[in-house]
Image: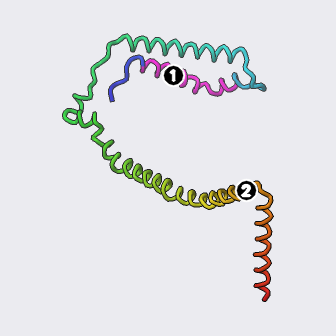
Amino acid sequence: GPAATAPMNAVLWLLAVPSLAFGLLYGWLADWFAGPSLAPTMTTSVLGTGLALIGALVTYAAWRQATAVGRTPDPTPALLGPLHQPARAGFHLDAAYDRMFVAPVRGGARLVNFLDREVVDAYVRGAATLPGWLGTLARRAQTGNAQTYLSVLLAGAVVLAVAVLAAGA
């Protein structure tokens, strides 16, 4: 790829040099930071805050310098030549992906939707039809007339008695 810009190199060097130095002084730093308590001390608080502030200032300065320079032209057309336009269109892989994966999944989803709506719901509607009819019959039978209720009860008892006698004979 292209060479790193000066602000990018500056930040990397700013991170690399202290890392290398502190790595070489590991034993000394371990003794310096080690202690019986892990509670923050004034030294670690000032050191951490100072390093964070320095990092923020360096990052801000690098950002200001990078944005102050005008934009460079896109080197892609020169690098790719005649492949630039097909590359910009993604070599039409989106269309191939759409045909190979998205279209079959959408077709399967339409099939599942049809089966759910027309087949499964038909069973549910069918299962609800019989209780609906029974409810309609019960509602029609509920006239509030006690003579009708007693007549139906007597007729049921007679039918039951005839069935018991017929089964026993």
Residue at the spot 48% in from the left edge and 13% down from the top edge: 60
Residue at the spot 46% in from the left edge and 11% down from the top edge: 61
| Residues packed near mark 2 inside 10 Å, few (<14), some (14 to 19) or many (20 plus) | few
| Residue occupied by mark 2 | 142
Q: What stretch is highlighted in magenta?
A: 8-31
Is 89 on the left or on the right of 39, as rendered?
Answer: left
Q: Is residue 15 magenta?
A: yes
Image position, residue 93 (x, y; %): 31, 43
Mark 1 or 2: in front is 2
Quarter holding residue 166 = bottom right
70 is higher (above) or lower (below) than 97 = above
Is 92 on the left or on the right of 58, as rendered?
Answer: left
Quarter holding residue 49 = top right
Q: What's the CA distance linking mark 1 and mark 2?
A: 89 Å
Image position, residue 50 (x, y; %): 61, 13
Look at the magenta stretch and give its main secondary structure.
Answer: helix
- Give the amino acid type for the residue marked by disc 2 in the picture: Gln
| Earlier sequence position, callout 1 versus callout 2 | 1
11 is higher (above) or lower (below) than 80 = above
| Residues packed near mark 1 inside 10 Å, few (<14), some (14 to 19) or many (20 plus) | few
Q: Which circle marks residue 15 in the picture?
A: 1
The image's colouring method is rainbow
Where disc 1 sits, the SS reads: helix
- Give the amino acid type for the residue marked by disc 1 in the picture: Leu
Image position, residue 78 (x, y; %): 22, 28
Seen as rendered, the residue at the extreme left is 82
Q: How many marks?
A: 2
